[in-house]
């Protein structure tokens, strides 16, 4: 029988967990696309809390590190999870789904959608002559759609922050691969991290430019990170 892996304090590490030479813990897993992802933490308990969140997201069919799927695909995934609902509720879900299939809005990627975009789409439906019952159905489902989008965005913020914290030399390309976001999006997100005082570049003579983490991550700043850098 192989010996179980332990950390520097003698605690047994679970499947996917490991501790690096710099004592940073990491957890590796595959997202719903089969792509390998890694999260980091300096504390094992904190890492395992993140593992629970990831597992819940995966069980719910949410891509923790993505945002690449379309509004329509996410809506279909959301509805497929709603088992045992009332007949009228199911009819309402299918009505909205069929409506979204006919709209350009349904084929846009979730990571590119803002709340204001959803609001403008609902205004368009009004201008197209859709009735009150349509608005009620659409608002309810789209509200859940945007909730999933926020969860995906919040997850990528934490992935980027922890990656920089765990590796001071991590590149934009590597952050893009870890988060599932485009390099441009990662660049903007990193700029926001800098503006909010989370990180900065440390310059030393004769050495490659490195990241320096200035403060602990505060999830309440997720909304601020969504804003474009000034």
Image (cartoon, helix red, strand yellow):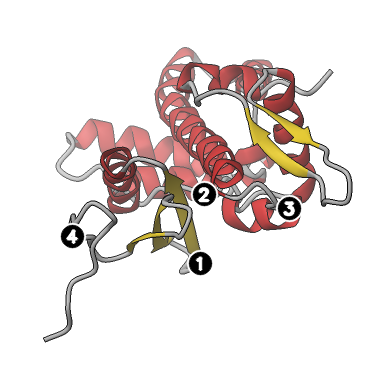
Q: N-terminal of the two: label 4 or label 1?
A: 4
Q: Name the residue under label 2.
A: 65
Q: Is residue 10 left or right of residue 225?
A: left
Asked if marks 1 and 2 touch (Cβ < 8 Å), the reply is yes
Q: Is mark 1 on a helix, strand or loop?
A: loop
Viewer-side label of 4, 3:
4
Query: In the image, what residue occupies the spot 65% across and 46% down?
Result: 168
Disc number at residue 35? 1
Q: In this view, does 218 lie above or below 184?
A: above
Quarter holding the C terminus is top right
Q: Give the Cα separation between the discs numbered 1 and 3.
A: 19 Å
Q: N-terminal of the two: label 3 or label 2?
A: 2
Q: What element carries label 2?
A: loop
Disc number at residue 171? 3
Q: In this view, does 33 lie to the left or right of 52?
A: right
Viewer-side label of 3, 2:
3
Q: What element carries label 3?
A: loop
Disc number at residue 12? 4
Q: N-terminal of the two: label 2 or label 4?
A: 4
Residue 62, horizontal then vertical, whole percent: 40, 48
Q: Give the Cα separation between the discs numbered 4 and 1.
A: 26 Å
């Amino acid at each position: 029988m192989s010996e179980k892996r332990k950390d520097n304090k003698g605690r047994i590490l679970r499947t996917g967990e490991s501790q690096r030479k710099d004592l940073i813990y990491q957890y590796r897993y595959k997202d719903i696309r089969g792509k390998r992802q890694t999260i980091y933490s300096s504390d094992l308990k904190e890492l395992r809390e993140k593992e629970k969140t990831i597992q819940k997201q995966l069980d719910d069919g949410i891509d923790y590190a993505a945002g690449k799927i379309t509004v329509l695909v996410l809506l279909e995934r959301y509805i497929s999870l709603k088992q045992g609902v009332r007949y009228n509720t199911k009819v309402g879900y299918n009505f909205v789904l069929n409506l979204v299939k006919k709209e350009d809005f349904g084929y846009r990627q979730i990571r590119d959608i803002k709340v204001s975009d959803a609001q403008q789409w609902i205004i368009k439906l009004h201008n197209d002559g859709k009735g009150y019952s349509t608005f009620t159905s659409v608002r309810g489902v789209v509200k859940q759609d945007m909730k999933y989008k926020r969860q995906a965005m919040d997850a990528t913020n934490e992935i980027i922050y922890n990656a920089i914290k765990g590796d001071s030399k991590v590149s934009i390309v590597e952050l893009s691969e870890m988060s599932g976001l485009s390099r441009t999006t990662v660049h903007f997100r990193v700029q926001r991290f800098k503006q909010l005082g989370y990180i900065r570049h440390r310059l030393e003579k004769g050495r490659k430019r490195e990241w320096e983490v200035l403060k602990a991550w505060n999830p309440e700043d997720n909304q601020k990170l969504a804003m474009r850098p000034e």
